């Protein structure tokens, strides 16, 4: 079969390497799926690393990632290509298996088919010869693409790289493929402890950001056994039931679990992120907040007689969820992402995820002070707080959320009406102002600044001039 590849430097690679250059893996799969490829991986046969590098130099930037395993990063006109030689790999140790615990041998004379056999899934085990657009598919990857199914290239070698368990979940989610049932019993025996937390987080982020329905990938992590090993606080949600009256949503087998609610909430959050065209950083913050917003429910669950019946309650689960999420982020080393304070934002959203609904419930008596405080507590990420509240509410119904409901629109209106924003909650009185009033920098100055900021949030002043007057009054009272 033939299929056309089209990317800027294709002619250059063909002119330089002729019949020996191939596009491989996900790029070829995405051509069949008519998806925009994320990246272009190339394989060059019959050439040594030194030979390839010498031919590329002068055309673009060449980075030799590893000579022994034959990988070159080649950047030209802002696009980076990963170029590899055919290779074979084997576990470094039978006892310890991690994503990097391999001995990799590059071999320019290794048959292309042997290189394809070492790849994880058959849908990724294809090559496209660029010179004549011929598809090389010895493992029937096209059949799996047509069937939309993730199948193993080599079941015996699958456990050698634990990352493949997470990749199975990610591909199923991003590509909307099903997982071949034969994979589950193999995957559950794979020890994932050797994986770096950075790679685990990277796969989770890809599931959340690249999937139309992130719940697909999250549920696959559950079924593959990865949730229990790598995300125990999320696994606990599948063992915690919710009140079936307040939370009628269930899993496929009728269980009213917190996990069932969480999966729907994450999908709804993803739809809102796309509808409102959030940046990738803001979208990830919203999705992570949706994923972790109820992680405190298992430890706060209890029965209580209310409204004439026994009901399951989770009093204080918002604060407990912040603590659980904080510990999880510590473990996964999640602090910032692309320069964005992802940890700080997510934890503040989790901690306050009931506050927006409380404002709505008390809308007949709520004052600007409450809106100031919520804005400050979410570090000015007001829209994200509103979106999370809306997604949480829509997490009781699998019907896709199409926009903001009455409560969310009211919240947006009130924040706008009272002119509460990230800018308006910045402290109006600063340390340099107190220095002008002969206050020495130190703990006392910090306490005064905090008291003034609380007064500002309580709407006791809303201009710098009035703030300075309040500062003078406080200092006189302290004297």
Image (cartoon, rainbow, N blue to C red):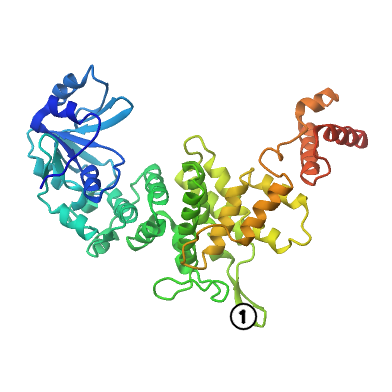
Q: Position of residue 284 (x, y in %)?
A: 48, 47
Q: Give the residue at x 20% y 31%.
A: 10
Q: Residue at x 49, y 42 (%)?
A: 279
Total tally of numbered discs in the picture: 1
Q: In the depicted view, which residue is nearer to us: 102 or 290?
A: 290
Decide which of 27, 239 is in the foreground and name it.
27
Bin the neighbour count of mark 1 within 10 Å (Cα to Cα): few under 14, some 14-19, many 20 and up. few
Decide if residue 20 is on the left or right side of residue 468.
left
- Is residue 233 visible in this depiction of the protein? no
Of all residues shown, which one is farthest toward the top? 58
User: Residue 4 occupies which quadrant of the picture?
Assistant: top left
From the top left corner, tell me how far across and down residue 397 is, in percent: 50, 68
Q: Is 347 situated left or right of 367 in this image?
A: left
Using the rendered image of the protein, determine whether residue 414 is visible from the camera's viewpoint: yes
SS at mark 1 in the image: strand
User: Looking at the figure, which quarter contains the C terminus?
Assistant: top right
Q: Image height check: is 287 above or below 109? A: below
Name the one closer to the observer, 54 or 384: 384
Instruction: Name the residue that disc number 1 marks.
Output: 310
Quarter holding residue 464: top right
In the depicted structure, whether residue 58 falls above or below residue 86 = above
Task: Give x and y (percent) for residue 411.
Answer: 66, 55
Indicate the position of residue 416 as horizontal and vertical percent values. 69, 47
Q: Residue at x 7, y 39 (%)?
A: 111
Q: Residue furthest bottom?
A: 308
């Amino acid at each position: 079969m033939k299929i056309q590849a089209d990317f800027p430097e294709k002619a250059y690679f063909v002119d330089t390497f002729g019949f020996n250059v191939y596009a491989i893996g996900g790029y070829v799969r995405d051509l069949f799926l008519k998806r925009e490829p994320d990246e272009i991986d190339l394989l060059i046969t019959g050439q040594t690393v030194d030979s390839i590098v010498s031919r590329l130099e002068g055309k673009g930037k060449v980075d030799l990632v590893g000579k022994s395993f034959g990988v070159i990063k080649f950047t030209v006109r802002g696009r980076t290509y990963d170029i590899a030689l055919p290779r074979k790999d084997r576990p470094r140790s039978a006892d310890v298996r991690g994503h990097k615990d391999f001995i990799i041998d590059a071999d320019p004379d290794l048959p292309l088919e042997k290189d394809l056999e070492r790849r994880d899934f058959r849908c990724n085990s294809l090559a496209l010869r660029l010179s004549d657009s011929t598809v090389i598919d010895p493992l029937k990857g096209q059949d799996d693409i047509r069937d939309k199914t993730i199948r193993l290239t080599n079941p015996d070698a699958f456990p050698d790289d634990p990352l493949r368990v997470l990749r199975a979940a990610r591909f199923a989610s991003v590509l909307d493929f099903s997982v071949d049932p034969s994979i589950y019993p193999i995957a559950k025996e794979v020890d994932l402890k050797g994986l770096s937390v950075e790679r685990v987080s990277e796969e989770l982020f890809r599931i959340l950001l690249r999937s139309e329905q992130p719940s697909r990938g999250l549920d696959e992590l559950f079924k593959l056994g990865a949730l229990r090993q790598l995300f125990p606080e999320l696994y606990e949600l599948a063992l915690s039931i919710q009140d079936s009256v307040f939370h009628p949503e269930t899993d496929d087998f009728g269980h009213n679990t917190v996990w069932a609610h969480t999966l729907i909430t994450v999908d709804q959050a993803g739809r809102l992120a796309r509808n409102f065209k959030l940046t990738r950083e803001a979208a990830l913050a919203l999705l992570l907040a949706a994923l972790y917003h109820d992680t405190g429910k298992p430890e706060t669950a209890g029965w209580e007689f209310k409204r004439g019946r026994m009901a399951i309650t989770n009093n204080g689960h918002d604060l407990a969820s912040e603590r659980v999420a904080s510990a999880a982020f510590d473990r996964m080393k999640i602090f910032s992402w692309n320069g964005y304070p992802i940890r700080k934002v997510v934890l503040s959203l989790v901690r306050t995820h009931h506050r927006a609904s409380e404002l709505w419930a008390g809308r007949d008596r709520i004052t600007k002070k409450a809106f100031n405080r919520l804005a400050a507590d979410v570090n000015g990420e007001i829209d994200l707080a509103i979106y999370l509240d809306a997604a949480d509410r829509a997490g009781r119904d699998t019907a896709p959320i199409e926009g903001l409901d009455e409560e969310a629109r009211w919240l947006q209106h009130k924040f706008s009406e009272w002119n509460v924003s990230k800018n308006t909650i910045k402290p109006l009185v600063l340390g340099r102002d107190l220095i002008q009033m002969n206050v020495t920098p130190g703990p006392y100055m910090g306490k005064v600044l905090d008291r003034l900021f609380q007064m500002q949030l309580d709407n006791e002043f809303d201009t710098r001039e009035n703030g300075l007057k309040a500062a003078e009054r406080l200092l006189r009272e302290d004297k």
